[in-house]
Amino acid sequence: MSFEKLNLNKPLISSLDDLGYIEPTPIQEKAFPIIMSGKDVIGIAQTGTGKTFAYLLPILRNLKFSAQKHPRVLIVVPTRELVLQIVKEIEKLSSYTSIRFIAIYGGTNMATQKQLVYNGVDIIVATPGRLVDLSLTGILRLKDIKQLVIDEVDQMFSLGFRQQLLSFLESLPNKRQNLMFSATMNEEIEAVIAKYFYQPLKIEVAPHGTPLEKIIQLCYHVPNFNTKVNLLEYLLKNDSALSKVLVFTGTKKLADSLYEVLKLRFPEEVVVIHSNLSQTARINSLKQFHDGKKRVLVATDIVARGLDITDVTHVINFDTPETPEDYIHRIGRTGRANKAGTAITFINEAEQEYQVAIETMMNKAIPYEAMPEEVVISKVMTDEELPKMIDKIKQKKGKDKHVAGPAFHEKKEKNKKVNLGSASIKEKMKGKIRTYRRN
Ligand code: ADP
Ligand code: MG
């Protein structure tokens, strides 16, 4: 089946020719006629299978030239990086037309965006926060929106955009087409669909949460941060196949800590991205990694959804993701557009419960690799790991002594003392970690 068989127009066919794409992917083929018919659609297909063009092709096919100022198509995504990526995809498909589109996202000058909106626009690609801010100014009016796309909606909920999402959904005209695309679904989203979509048709290429067959998955059982660092270092040093490596950590703080350590061991090879960095820093890190100038990108889940980074060879879950959905999206940054890819997950004892949930959803066990002998198993805990250990000791002591519980105001005093105590242990341990890390 070539693209010719979809009811495309000349400008789209020419653009696809320029891109060198020969045939539509299964989700593109299935979604096209249904979206063209005007129905609401929920599209579920695995990561990297071309969901963006699955909605862009019919949208662009439908969009007639108009001089009107207010946008007719609204595409909402959870992160700024994804906004920029989707705008690029529209650019690729619209080089033979005069369609007007803009990117609306936070961390940038709102005045510039206001001016662009004021000049007139057909398609808006936005993050929910800035979208709501702009429509509150009165310059951006959503009353002419005919088609709404929500891409990667579940991450919007996890990033706390719930309120903004529901608020602009309320401000859209009733008569519109709703489209939603993702590799995973959850109950919260089903509720939004039930409330805001009209008799949606579900197009499912693979059941929700099915990982791509092409992604080789494996895991290691690793006790703590420092041993995880040792293993990562070992893999990066000994396996040259790890040439474009995306490393996910559980928090921004851990991303920074890991970046600091890796920077010493692999100077000039590592960049980092998370939401506490400036927008310029975020864009730079991503670009350097994307262009192959840096070998390793240390990241939080901010880049786990939707981002299409060329030829990522390995995804490493330095921390096991807490939900199976996060796992599917993270590993889906590799193995895109029929390429090969490997996903390696580091699992400590506490993270084994996440592993169970992930394997249950995939209905498949992640093959386990034995720890290479050369990797030193560290007994040194980090600042984050220490308090947990102290808690354990405290619990044990409490059980042994079994003293009567103090009154409420006394408890506060007690907590203060414990905090001071753990801080001094932390200080002592810090010295150890430093010595250790130099090894
Ligand atoms: P998803 O949203 O399903 O994760 P994307 O839409 O980001 O996937 O597409 C993944 C990659 O596949 C992109 O680099 C995209 O340009 C490419 N792609 C999309 N459609 C086709 C096609 N029909 N043929 C070849 N490559 C395609
Ligand atoms: Mg996508």
Image (cartoon, grey):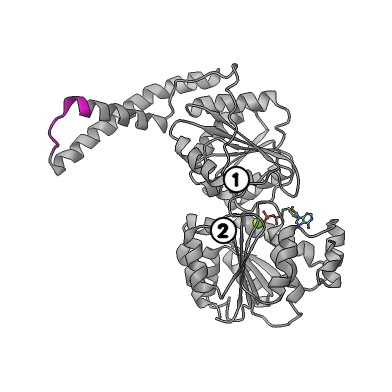
Q: Amino acid at mark 1?
A: Arg
Decide which of 87, 329 is in the foreground and name it: 329
The disc, 2 or 1, on the residue closer to the chain's N-terminal end is: 2
Residue density around tag 2, few if under 14, some if 14–19, many if 20 or more, within 10 Å:
many
Q: Secondary structure at mark 1?
A: helix
Q: Nearer the viewer, mark 2 or mark 1?
A: 1
Q: Quadrant of the N terminus?
A: bottom right
In this rendering, is residue 101 above or below 227?
below
Q: Quadrant of residue 55?
A: bottom right
**Residue where numbered disc 2 is placed:** 78
**Residue where numbered disc 1 is placed:** 330
Residue 12 at x, y = what percent?
82, 68
In this rendering, is residue 371 above or below 164?
above
In this rendering, is residue 314 above or below 175?
above
Residue 309 at x, y = what percent?
70, 47
State which region is magenta.
398-406
Residue at 68 percent across and 75 percent down: it is 121
Q: Secondary structure at mark 2?
A: loop
Residue density around tag 1, few if under 14, some if 14–19, many if 20 or more, within 10 Å:
many
* Ligand 1 location (quadrant): bottom right
Residue at 76 percent across and 80 percent down: it is 65
Camera sees residue 28: yes
Q: Amino acid at mark 2?
A: Pro
Residue 206: mark: none
Camera sees residue 161: no
| Measured Cα–Cα span from mark 2 to mark 1 | 15 Å
